[in-house]
Image (cartoon, grey):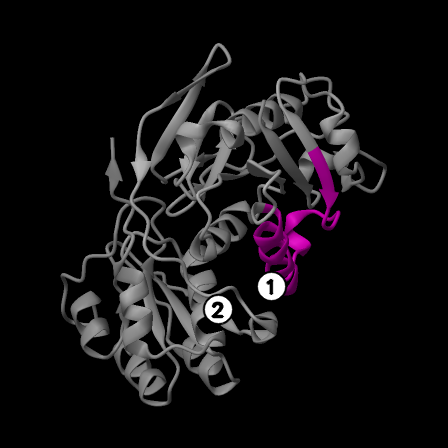
Amino acid sequence: MAHIRIMATGGTIASRSGKDGATSAERAEELAAGLSGRHGYSVQDLTNVNSFLLRLTDVRLIAEAVRDAVADEGVDGVVITHGTDTMEETAFLLDLVHESPKPVVLTGAQRTADSPMADGPVNLEEAVAAAASSRLRGTGVLISFAGQVLAARGTRKLHTIAASPFGGGVPVAHFTAGVLHITAVPLRPAALPLPGEDFDNARVEIIYCGLGTTPDLLTHAVRSGANAVVLAGTGIGNAGEGFAEAVQDAVRGGCPVILCTRVPSGPVIPTYGAGGGVDLVRAGAIPGGDLGPSQARMLAALLTSLPATQDEILQALTSGTGRTNG
């Protein structure tokens, strides 16, 4: 029998409905009370808010709590209950700094704890089973939800209300009739340093591109003190008139620009000139590869708070691209 540390942060899985809307209410002990007992567990409440209210400080403290938990010889794995709104961001930051082979699994719910069709209990049971699996040692940080287990890197919330809202990441495992089946093992880069207190105040803005948008917001973000900017380009990484010049000014001024895409799936591949990805990269933008804008923002926040050079940011983006064994 494995022993799992269950850490609660709030979210829909812990929420109950009220006249002013659903709010996070239940604690870790209440969430764990319905577990089958196949594995031992201990509980820890880290915070209790819906995940759209989390700050970088909270994510740093979660990372520190995970480090301490996996250092405990009596703990075989960690499960974190978390809101789905920003789960992909917390999971990716944790994966970037996770050194232990012990699995860390995030889960949550799409329906509140007081819903007659609450999905939280099943998701939590499966997450505990994944964290307890010796075959998932060394796979880093995972998201377990609605029967599928995904690598943190590349995973995005793709649907607002679907029972299985996540996709994009490497499918590591899935559950069939309660049995865990391993399908792939991610190849992971070396862990980055744990965030320090400077991470709490890192400013990384996401600028979305669309038909006819101007680079004014990018320029404003740089002038107002952003540590880095993520440019969510169109298609395979493009932007309109004036963006290449704005990127060049930002990079020359010491503000890294990471080029991602606003498209939910697929990598950035600089291909087009005339202000497209080729010109943006030539101006100094760093291609974000397979990372979506929100995960690229977390990486940039960590690296710029360390601090890291433009070349170090490029290296971090080009390592661990989600390749698998299996």
Q: Quadrant of the N terminus?
A: top right
Left or right: residue 260 compared with residue 67: left
Residue stretch rendered in magenta on the structure: 42-69
Q: Secondary structure at mark 1?
A: helix
Left or right: residue 295 compared with residue 27: left
Q: Secondary structure at mark 2?
A: helix
* Label 2 crowd bin: few (<14), some (14–19), many (20+), radius 10 Å: many
Q: Which residue is mark 2?
A: 301
Kindly report the distance in space between the C-alpha atoms of the residues bearing marks 2 and 1.
9 Å
Q: Position of residue 164 (x, y in %)?
A: 49, 28
Q: Main secondary structure of the magenta part?
A: helix
The residue at the point 51 percent across, 13 percent down is 178
Question: Mark 2 vs mark 1: which is more N-terminal?
Answer: 1
Query: Are the residues tagged 2 and 1 within 8 Å (C-beta)?
Result: yes
- Name the amino acid, label 2: Ala
Front in this rendered view, residue 146 or 184? 184
Q: Which mark is residue 56?
A: 1
The number of numbered discs placed on residues in the rendered structure image is 2
The residue at the point 31 percent across, 77 percent down is 310
